[in-house]
Image (cartoon, rainbow, N blue to C red):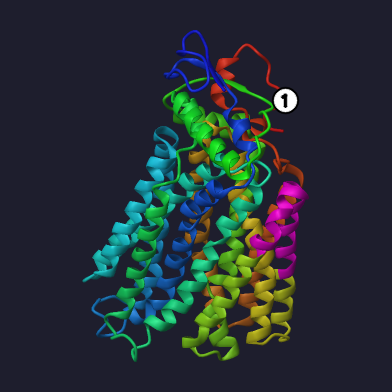
Amino acid sequence: MTAFGPDGGQGGRGGGTGGTGGTITTDVPARLDRLPWSRWHWMIVIGLGTVWILDGLEATVVGNIASRLSEPGSGLSITDAQVTGVAAALYVAGACTGALVFGWLTDRHGRKKLFLVTLGVYLAATALTAVSFSAWWFFLFRFLTGFGIGGEYSAINSAIDELIPRIYRGRVDLIINGSFWLGAMGGSLLSVLMLNTGVFPLNVGWRLTFAFGVVLGLAILLVRRNVPESPRWMFIHGRAAGAEQLVAEAERRIEARTGRRLPEPDQAITVRTRKSTGFVEIARTLLRTYPRRAFLGLALFIGQAFLYNAITFGFGSILVRFFGVPSGDTGYYFAVIAFGNFLGPLLLGRLFDTVGRRPMISSTYLLSGVLLFLTAWMFGDGRLGATTMTACWCAVLFFASAGASAAYLTVSEVFPMETRALAIAFFYAIGTAAGGISGPLIFSDLTQSGVVADTVLAFSIGASLMVAAGLVAAFLATPAERRSLEDIAEPLSARAATASAPASGPADG
């Protein structure tokens, strides 16, 4: 139930308005965390999680169709370098910008409103990319496509973690973030079909590839309309009665379906409602109250960004230059690598909730780094062919993908709720910028030079940063498994309501 203080409206279950500035005591978080898995949760996962498939599709398809876009008769006057260079950089810049802008708006205006807006931006921008008639038009709408996708990361991750019960939160978050690779696999295979001129004309196939993303996005939008707002966000922002009603309805449906009454919640929290949280308070929280967690987030994001760029940025060139694989066949190899990436979170995700965050995050980072060092040694010694190199990459990325997904999980659960979306956006922007800007600058010449020692160096750089991040996680990762979000990081509004009371534990524990 939700009870309102003297300045917060009426008391009682489902009563009152809880306007901003009032103090309320609520058991909504505990009630959400003790729910058994149900169709209600599947709706959330399908409605919110499938957008990562779109991101994987977008990130993969442009690289695969770059050569077609630059061919005479494609309907677009653009060079291969402009597609893989300018357009890719603008997509990354858009994603970083969108993450920060929509991250701030998500914490201020709510999860549901923004995850509908960000998907709408993606749909419009992708549709307009499909009808590109010049290079500047293509560049503009690649930026706006990234702008929408970047906004999705903060809005969706924050909503997922606040709606999923604590005992499932780790595996669900990892699998959802790992579904990026289903999109990447689909994008690789889709490009093989769409670029077959025996099936589609030269100037049509690449446009249909983008149009397919629009169709998939519209289907996701129809499901997403039924996904609820985060009750946690609602009661902090003065909508306690709405949060109470939403959770009560979910409880009623689950009890009716199972035929069993849910156990009583075991704890409540008192907060002072607020409309928004300022940038200064958010920065102070991340850098002063939780500096070790902030350092951990940076280490995890930068480590995975460089490892992935060390492998994926030049994988096609490596297969073609060193192993004689035809350029038209590299998409099949990438599909295999993408499948290995998805298997990591799928098979290891449960262990993040049972074995624990710290051992699993550190071990996945360390194992992927060590395996990449081993791959670099075998490649430099001439022991690998195209098939065995791909197998090695799959082994590396099986662990790296679980670790990279855990980076998103970490920054979405270790900071207070009022800062969650912007914290996700901040670390995502840093990691994406490191991977999308520094990565290509470092790895492009190394992986495409045709010199074995250069590629070995590229692998070694990525492996070193991954191992370093794993060591940081071994000491600093927060044991967040099976704990409520409010226990991991007390909401700022709870501190405001009990400003004179000491904290229940060390802020950066």
The residue closer to the viewer here, 474 or 486, is 486
Residue 152 percent location from the top left of the image? 44, 50
User: For the N terminus, which image quadrant?
Assistant: top right
- Assess whether residue 347 is covered by the magenta stretch: yes
Q: Residue at x 52, y 72 (%)?
A: 185
Image-based side of 58 in relation to 301, left or right? left
- Assess whether residue 445 is covered by the magenta stretch: no
Residue 493 percent location from the top left of the image? 54, 22
Height in image: 223 above or below 312? above
Residue 334 percent location from the top left of the image? 55, 77
Q: Which residues are magenta?
A: 344-371
User: For the C terminus, which image quadrant?
Assistant: top right
Q: Secondary structure at mark 1?
A: loop
The residue closer to the viewer here, 211 or 479, is 211
Q: Give, as a three-letter code, the residue at label 1.
A: Gly
The residue closer to the viewer here, 391 or 287, is 391
Image-based side of 266 in relation to 161, left or right? right
Height in image: 257 above or below 60? above
Image-based side of 122 in relation to 426, left or right? left
Report the magenta stretch's main SS.
helix
Residue 460 falls in image quadrant: bottom right
Residue 264 visible in the snapshot: yes
Residue 96 visible in the snapshot: no
Height in image: 488 above or below 25? below
Residue 153 percent location from the top left of the image? 48, 50
Q: What residue is shown with label 1?
A: 505
Q: Residue at x 38, y 41 (%)?
A: 113
